[in-house]
Image: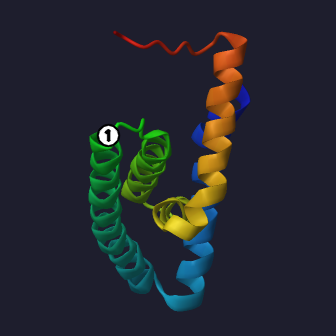
Amino acid sequence: MLRWLIVLIVILPALEIGLFVWVGGEIGPWWVVLLIIFTGIVGAWLARQQGLDTFRRAQQSMGQGIFPEEQIFDGICVLIGGLLLLSPGFITDTVGLLLLIPITRRPFKASFQALARKWTKKGTYITFRRF
């Protein structure tokens, strides 16, 4: 886990800066700024839409007496995708948008579910139910 944190803190910003410089050299710095603003606006709209949709589906599931497991993991993906879109960069924006689009979210959601199961079995993450 620490390795991934080091990657996120050190390597990812370096890659983002390199990509900014390269794209800025190809299309111009003002277009890069406009792209960052555009992806932020589209991402905020998509995060709001998907978040509300996930919330509604969770409410429907709970209204039927079904635990909203799928919606919880959808919500986690939407939250992480929205946070990634807050940080400027083409790599983080791409991953954030992939997390917000329902079709491309499925592999991420499956990975998060597998990670939660692994943590639960290992004892790192404990689930409980209040009666």
Horizontally, is 117 left or right of 20 in the view?
right
Task: Find residue 2 and report its image quarter.
Answer: top right
- Residue 121 drawn above or below residue 29: above
- SS of the residue under disc 1: helix
At x 66% / y 9%, what residue is drawn? 123
As drawn, the residue found furthest toward the front would be 64
Residue 131 percent location from the top left of the image: 34, 9
- Return the residue at label 1: 62
- Residue 111 drawn above or below residue 98: above
At x 42% / y 35%, what residue is drawn? 67
As drawn, the residue found furthest toward the bottom would be 27
- Residue 80 drawn above or below residue 67: below
Residue 47 percent location from the top left of the image: 34, 61
Mark 1 neighbour density, 10 Å: few (under 14) some (14–19) many (20 or more): few
The amino acid type found where label 1 is placed reads Met
Front residue of this view, candidates 22 and 85: 85
Res 91 visible? no
At x 35% / y 36%, what residue is drawn? 65
Task: Find residue 107 and report its image quarter.
Answer: bottom right
Res 63 visible? yes
Number of numbered discs on residues = 1
At x 66% / y 21%, what residue is drawn? 119
Residue 112 percent location from the top left of the image: 61, 40
Of the 4 image quadrants, the one containing the N terminus is top right
Front residue of this view, candidates 100 and 74: 74
